[in-house]
Image (cartoon, rainbow, N blue to C red):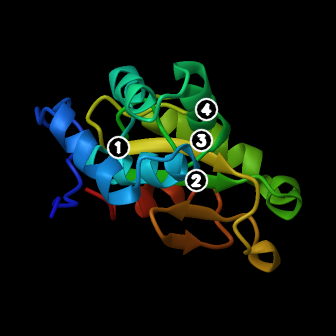
Amino acid sequence: MLQEERVQPGSHHSFDHQQDIDKIIDLCGRDRSNLIQILHQIQNIQGFLPLETLRQVAIKLDMPLSEVAGVVSFYSFFSTEPQGRHTIRVCLGTACYVRGGKKLIEKLQEQLGIELGQTTSDQRFTFEIARCIGACGLAPAVMIDNEVYRQVNVNKLKSILAKYE
């Protein structure tokens, strides 16, 4: 059975072994209808989906690379770049936006030294937005990994980030 161990970002693990991808595809079934499940399994192990991996999946499923890449680019939960150990998502749903979500983004960009969609050079954080995380009554909200912080203001950000190594 294939081990599903997530590789730490920035590690030098090589996941370009054809046989690992073959095992995942065999477990999920060599059918294009299983593409999303296959991509999830590979990303869970590898941490992201580089172009060479997409190419291998396309060949094994007898699909055009453009179709596989199209699925990856359509769904926000797939990434073609290495991700940080922690993912910060600032909610930009209506309530969070009007209560200061944009200011949180600007402050985080300043504190982290990166733009939305990027990962810090130390691989500590990946910075994203979310359309709604369901904390509208206590907006604005920020989610780090699976932890939701409510009623966040720019003065709280530094102490929140300090919890994550």
* Cα distance in 3D space between marks 2 and 4: 18 Å
Element carrying mark 1: loop
Q: Which residue is mark 1?
A: 84
- Please tell me in which quadrant of the rendered image residue 159 appears: bottom left
Q: Is 5 on the left-hand or right-hand side of 125?
A: left
Q: Could you tell me which residue is drawn at 48 percent across and 29 percent down? A: 62
Say whether disc 3 or disc 1 marks the residue closer to the N-terminus.
Answer: 1
Residue 73: image tag: 4
**40 lies above or below 108:** below
Q: Measured from the top left, where is residue 107 in percent x and y?
A: 59, 41
Give the mark toward the camera: 2 or 4: 4
Residue 15: image tag: none
Element carrying mark 4: helix
Residue 37 appears in the figure: yes
Give the mark toward the camera: 3 or 4: 4
Q: Which residue is mark 2?
A: 89
Say whether disc 2 or disc 3 marks the residue closer to the N-terminus.
Answer: 2
**Amino acid at the residue labelled 1:** Gly
* Cα distance in 3D space between marks 4 and 1: 19 Å
Say whether disc 4 or disc 1 marks the residue closer to the N-terminus.
Answer: 4
* Cα distance in 3D space between marks 2 and 1: 12 Å
Residue 85 appears in the figure: no
Q: Which residue is mark 3?
A: 107
* Cα distance in 3D space between marks 3 and 1: 19 Å
Say whether disc 3 or disc 4 marks the residue closer to the N-terminus.
Answer: 4
The quadrant of the rendering that contains the C terminus is: bottom left
Q: Measured from the top left, where is residue 117 in percent x and y?
A: 55, 33
